[in-house]
Image: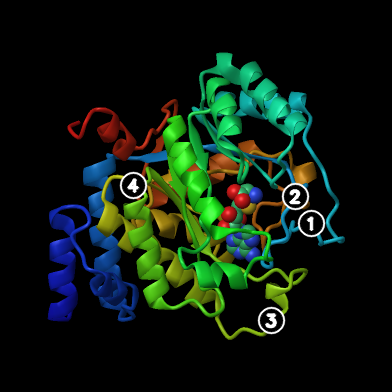
Amino acid sequence: MSDTIATIMAKAVEHPQNLALAELETLLGVEDPEELSRMFDAARKLKLKCCGKGIAMRGLVEAGNTCAKDCFYCGIRKSNAAVTRYSLSADEIVAAAEESKALGYASLVIQSGEIESESHTAFIENVLERIRHLNLGVTLSLGEQEESVYARWKAAGASRYLLRIETSNPELYARIHPAECDWARRVECLRALRRTGYQVGTGVMCMLPGQTLADLARDIEFYARMDVDMIGMGPYIPHEQTPLGQEAGHVTTEERLLMGLKMIAVTRLYLHDVNIAAATALQALAEDGRERGVMAGANVIMPNITDVRYRRSYQLYAGKPCLNENAGMCKGCLESRLESIGETVLYGQYGDSRHYKKRQDGGCL
Ligand code: SAH
């Protein structure tokens, strides 16, 4: 291993946020297989030290694909006429929450396209009130909303919110979104979520056209600057029914996967105690993508528990996995996959971010 990489890694594990921008960039640029495997090992060890043993599970329910946004990369963008639109009923979401509980996942993620309306706000509020008695840790991923909406959902029982910034570079953001999408509003939403008392999660896509290693290093600094508790990030995967997906690209599947893994490892090495999810997009690129995410330092997995009838309609990118497998099948499969790499599934636990808990306790846990 080169001295430079060894020195940077030794520095990284000393304490959080101990690397300069150029050092983050150097780690993200590692290509040598041996260096990579040492970097992933170091990140996984740090995960064990700072987040404990085992992998936290969140049942993911894709509540609807109707979206007001027209993001240039996303398969469910509003202009994609080829998508059959659906919205789960309140009963269906409640049933999914009950299933999540029955499967032993003490935590639930409700994700959908972006809708801002009083009826949608009230609908989600009602669902949250109906599942409150299940005592699940509930994460929402429902896009940009007014602070008052975030507050209502919080009061109704949600405790975490995931809103990816997509990229911390406002110019790159402007290139992959229509003009009405405002990067600054997204940042303001993250601040509003923090003020409202959520455990806040964000993340980016990597391997976007035109994105540089310096952009990705700055993304990791952005996580630190925003002092977020959870990270959900993954490789960008072209979807042919989108404008960005039709642009010619020269990135291989292996390169996308590898950068997804490096982002996990370097984020772990920089932030230590945040929750980092091994995103489903990794699994879309390789069958064992999520396990590899865990081996690179991730500590959360979000198995899809959406009814298989709807999964095909919630394709943000090409190659979405497990389109025909129900939640029970996914559970068995995941458990054995995680055991094969020496991990255990944490059943019946909220899996709160330790970073959040430390902040709540004034810095000492
Ligand atoms: N609309 C909600 C959540 C649904 S989209 C929100 O904005 O928060 C969830 C995430 O899927 C997005 O944040 C984006 O990062 C990711 N995504 C969308 N299209 C993608 C693609 N083509 N490749 C990889 N990830 C994609």
Quarter holding the N terminus?
A: bottom left
Given the image, on which type of amino acid does mark 4 rest?
Asp
Question: From the viewer's perspective, is residue 27 above or below residue 356?
Answer: below
Residue carrying label 2: 67
Q: Position of residue 219 (x, y in %)?
A: 40, 63
- The mark found on residue 227 in the picture is 4
* In this picture, residue 292 sits left or right of residue 273: right
Identify residue for label 1. 78
Label 4 beta carbon less than 8 Å to ligand 1: no
How much space separates mark 3 and mark 2, taking CA atoms?
23 Å
Point 38% across, 46% down: residue: 228
Q: Position of residue 248 (x, y in %)?
A: 67, 85
Q: Is there any visible trace of residue 156 in the rendered image? A: yes
Q: Secondary structure at mark 3?
A: loop
Residue 247, numbered circle:
3
Spatial CA span between label 1 and label 2 = 5 Å
Q: Earlier in the sequence, mark 1 or mark 4?
A: 1
- State the image quarter where residue 33 is shown: bottom left
Mark closer to the chain start, 4 or 2 = 2
Task: Identify the image quadrant of residue 306.
Answer: top right
Task: State the residue in front, 179 or 324.
Answer: 179
Give the label on residue 196, or none.
none
Asked which secondary structure carries label 1, the reply is loop
Is 172 left or right of 121, judged from the image as shown? left
Residue type for callout 3? Glu
Where residue 254 sits in the image (x, y, percent)?
A: 50, 75
* Amino acid marked by disc 1: Lys
Camera-side mark, 3 or 2: 2
Mark 1 within 8 Å of ligand 1, using the beta carbon: no
Query: What residue sits 56% from the left and 39% below the top?
Result: 331
Tell me the kind of residue under disc 2: Cys
Is residue 44 visible in the rendered image? The answer is: no
